[in-house]
Image (tube, rainbow, N blue to C red):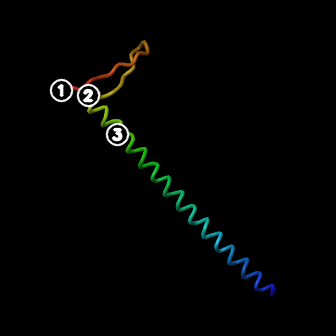
Amino acid sequence: MDPCTNVAIWFASLAAARALESENERLKRLIAEQLLVIDGLKEFSRKKSRRFAGINSVTEASNGAISFCRSPL
């Protein structure tokens, strides 16, 4: 095989590898963004379910017991 052909093939495979790395990074960023959205929705859901249960916050007493502060009706 001609040396120029080998170099052309090598550069083509290098370009393809760089394109794959670029796509991989893009997908990693997309997954990270989606995980942040999921975490935000979980937090929102947890706060909403606490609100519907009539619980505003959870406080810890001095003896370590957990008491729930209920919201007014």
Amino acid under disc 1: Leu
60 shown above or below 7 = above
Is 33 on the left or on the right of 57, as rendered? right
Dot 3 falls on a residue whose secondary structure is helix
Categorize mark 1 by other alpha carbons within 10 Å: few (<14), some (14-19), many (20+): few
Mark 1 lies on a secondary structure that is loop
Q: Name the residue under label 1.
A: 73
Residue 12 lies, in percent from the top left, at 68, 78
Residue 72 position in % (x across, y down): 20, 25
The residue carrying mark 2 is: 54
Measure the alpha-carbon separation of dots 1 and 3: 21 Å
Distance between mark 3 and mark 2 Cα atoms: 14 Å
What amino acid does circle 3 point to?
Ser
Direction top: furthest residue: 63
Amino acid type, mark 2 = Gly
At label 2, counting other C-alpha atoms closer than 10 Å, the crowd grade (few under 14, some 14-19, many 20 or more) is some
Q: Identify the mark nearer the N-term, 1 or 3.
A: 3
Choose the circle earlier in sequence order: 2 or 1: 2
Q: Residues within 10 Å of mark 3 (few under 14, many from 20)?
A: few
Q: Is residue 35 above or below residue 24?
A: above
Q: How far apart are marks 2 and 1 (CA)?
A: 8 Å
Query: SS at mark 2?
Result: loop
Picture residue at 53% right of the left edge, 62% below the top? 26
Marks 3 and 2 in Cβ contact (< 8 Å):
no
Label 3 belongs to which residue?
Answer: 45
Q: Quadrant of residue 19?
A: bottom right
- Image-quadrant location for residue 20: bottom right
